[in-house]
Amino acid sequence: MSADLDLGAISAKAGDKYSPNLHRWLKHWPYRGAESAPEVFRNTDGLLYIGIVHDDGWFSGALLNTVLCNGVRADIGAYAPPFVAQKLKRVDGFWEAYQERGRCAIDPEHRVNFQGDTRWSADGDSRRCAWCGHVQYRRRWTESVERSGWFDSPDAAGCAAFETETRP
Ligand SMILES: [Zn+2]
């Protein structure tokens, strides 16, 4: 592993913000040496991959989301050079961001519910991310539903009767 990827610093023991599955998967990473530490790439559809690009242009790795969900059961696949060259772009500074914010570096929009989620502590209508400090606020709204139906009479009373009968 390279100097900027210290496995002990991103184990679940070091903090809830770090994915236990990603840590286990990294421990089983088969390629050794400073040049072979896995990096994170984003494809043109926005999906994240973790792995390495070999000198011959092939990529060995997996979808990061699969690693987060399946841990060591996430197989390492081989991706051909055209896919790598046309689709994958390295995410610079990923490990630094992950070390600092954990899984919030993977989901900066805070939309994902991660496994064993200890992310939020709620206080009334706001909640704070324990992993990075991000705060979200609850909004409440009412949505109206438009309905229609066929009736024997065109008057509003018919509609009211219909609504009364169909609502629980
Ligand atoms: Zn966060």
Image (cartoon, grey):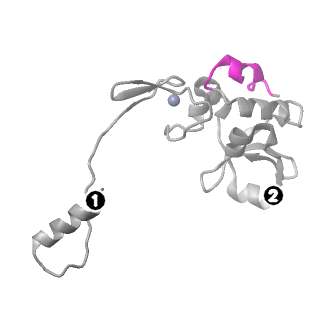
Task: Classify 54 as above or below 3.
Answer: below
> Which of the two residues, 154 or 50, is positioned nearer the viewer here?
154
Q: Residues within 10 Å of mark 1 (few under 14, many from 20)?
A: few
Quadrant (top left/top right/bottom left/bottom right) for the N terminus: top right
* Picture quadrant where residue 123 is located: top left
Q: Residue at x 52, y 37 (%)?
A: 108
Which residue is tagged 1? Answer: 167
Residue 50, x across and y down, in percent: 73, 42
Kindly state the secondary structure of the residue where label 1 is placed.
loop
> Which of the two residues, 76 or 166, is positioned nearer the viewer here?
166
Q: Residue at x 70, y 59 (%)?
A: 86
Amino acid, disc 1: Arg
Q: Residue furthest bottom?
A: 152
Q: Residue at x 34, y 25 (%)?
A: 124
Q: On the picture, is 137 further left or further right than 2? A: left
Amino acid, disc 2: Pro
Q: Residues within 10 Å of mark 2 (few under 14, many from 20)?
A: some
Q: Residue furthest front?
A: 165
Residue 6 in the magenta stretch? The answer is: yes
Which stretch appears magenta?
A: 2-17
N-terminal label among 1 and 2: 2
Kindly state the secondary structure of the residue where label 2 is placed.
helix
Quadrant (top left/top right/bottom left/bottom right) for the C terminus: bottom left
Residue 64 in the magenta stretch? The answer is: no
Front: mark 1 or 2: 1
- Tell me how far mark 1 sits from mark 2, CA to CA: 58 Å
Q: On the picture, is 144 further left or further right than 25? A: left
Which residue is tagged 2? Answer: 81
The tag on residue 135 is none
Task: Classify 118 as above or below 50.
Answer: above
- Inspect this view and state whether residue 30 appears: yes
Q: Residue at x 50, y 37 (%)?
A: 110
